[in-house]
Image (spheres, rainbow, N blue to C red):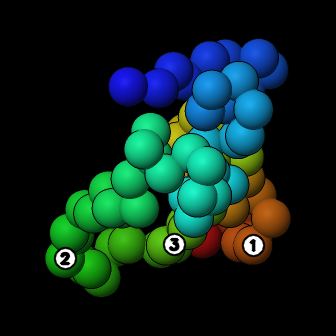
């Protein structure tokens, strides 16, 4: 198999960022194009759906992304959104 190496960000064979390696014929033996899938029933109290690449998740935690969404899209008045 191939190697995934962390040089500032995760890279396949030390060459290509993991998210960009999908579809690269030379790295095909080491990378799958099968996505991770999570099912979640959307409820009334769900406020955001965040779809992001590894560039976001390499630099931000889930909590930080949630705070970023709240701060940049909602107005809080008297402790209510």
Which secondary structure lies at badge 2?
loop
Mark earlier in primary sequence (1, 2): 2
In which image quadrant can residue 13 be found? top right
Whether 43 is drawn above or below 2: the answer is below
In which image quadrant can residue 24 be found? bottom right
Task: Give left or right: position of 71 versus 38.
Answer: right
Q: Which residue is mark 2?
A: 41
Please provide percent x and percent y for residue 10: 64, 28
Give me the C-alpha separation between circle 3 and circle 1. Answer: 10 Å
Please provide percent x and percent y for residue 7: 77, 17
Query: Do the residues bearing badges 1 and 2 touch, measured as CB atoms within 8 Å?
Result: no
Which numbered mark, 3 or 1, is in the foreground of this view?
3
Q: Residues within 10 Å of mark 3 (few under 14, many from 20)?
A: few
Which secondary structure lies at badge 1?
helix
Give me the C-alpha separation between circle 1 and circle 2. Answer: 23 Å
Which residue occupies 61% across, 33% down?
12
Give me the C-alpha separation between circle 2 and circle 3. Answer: 13 Å
Which secondary structure lies at badge 3?
loop
Q: Residues within 10 Å of mark 1 (few under 14, many from 20)?
A: few
Mark earlier in primary sequence (2, 3): 2
**What numbered label is drawn on residue 73?**
1
Q: Quadrant of the C terminus?
A: bottom right
Please provide percent x and percent y for residue 26: 61, 49
Q: Which residue is mark 3?
A: 48
């Amino acid at each position: 198999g191939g190697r995934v190496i962390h040089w500032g960000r995760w890279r396949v064979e030390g060459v290509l960022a993991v998210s960009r390696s999908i579809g690269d014929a030379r790295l095909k033996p080491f990378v799958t194009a099968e996505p991770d899938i999570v099912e979640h029933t959307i409820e009334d109290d769900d406020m955001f759906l965040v779809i992001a690449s590894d560039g976001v998740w390499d630099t931000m935690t889930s909590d930080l992304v949630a705070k970023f969404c709240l701060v940049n899209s909602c107005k809080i008045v008297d402790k209510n959104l």
